[in-house]
Amino acid sequence: MSKSALEFAIFCIEAVAQRLHLPGNRVYDMLAKQSDILNTYLIPSFDVLHTQSKQYIVDDILSLMRERGVLS
């Protein structure tokens, strides 16, 4: 994983945590351990996603979390 992709992943985790009012480590667990969204979607889609707005990215992640049953 490139440094840019790692920084993007951290940005995503913190932005989602902020929106959900949850600690970053809890959101990391949801994205990496409970659903694998981090490795199957965020990192592979980095080139496209990092060009989008923060709101779009967070909304997209939350939608995927709901779809995968990590968030109700």
Image (cartoon, rainbow, N blue to C red):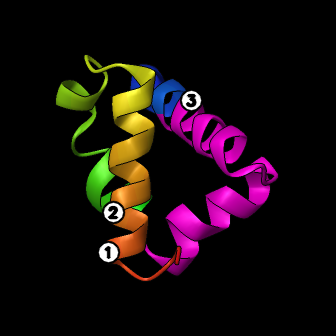
Q: CA distance from mark 1 to mark 3?
A: 21 Å
Residue drawn where x is 66% and y is 37% of the image: 14
Q: Which residues are magenta?
A: 9-36
Mark 1 residue element = helix
Q: Which residue is mark 1?
A: 67
Residue 23 point in image, percent of width and height: 82, 52
Name the quadrant containing residue 2: top left
Question: Is residue 24 a member of the stretch shown in magenta?
Answer: yes
Name the disc covering residue 25, or none. none
Q: Which residue is mark 3?
A: 11
Residue closest to the far front:
72
Relative side of 45 to 16, left or right? left
Image vertical order of residue 71 relative to residue 69, above or below: above
- Judged by its main secondary structure, the magenta piece is helix
Mark 2 residue element = helix
Q: Which residue is mark 2?
A: 64
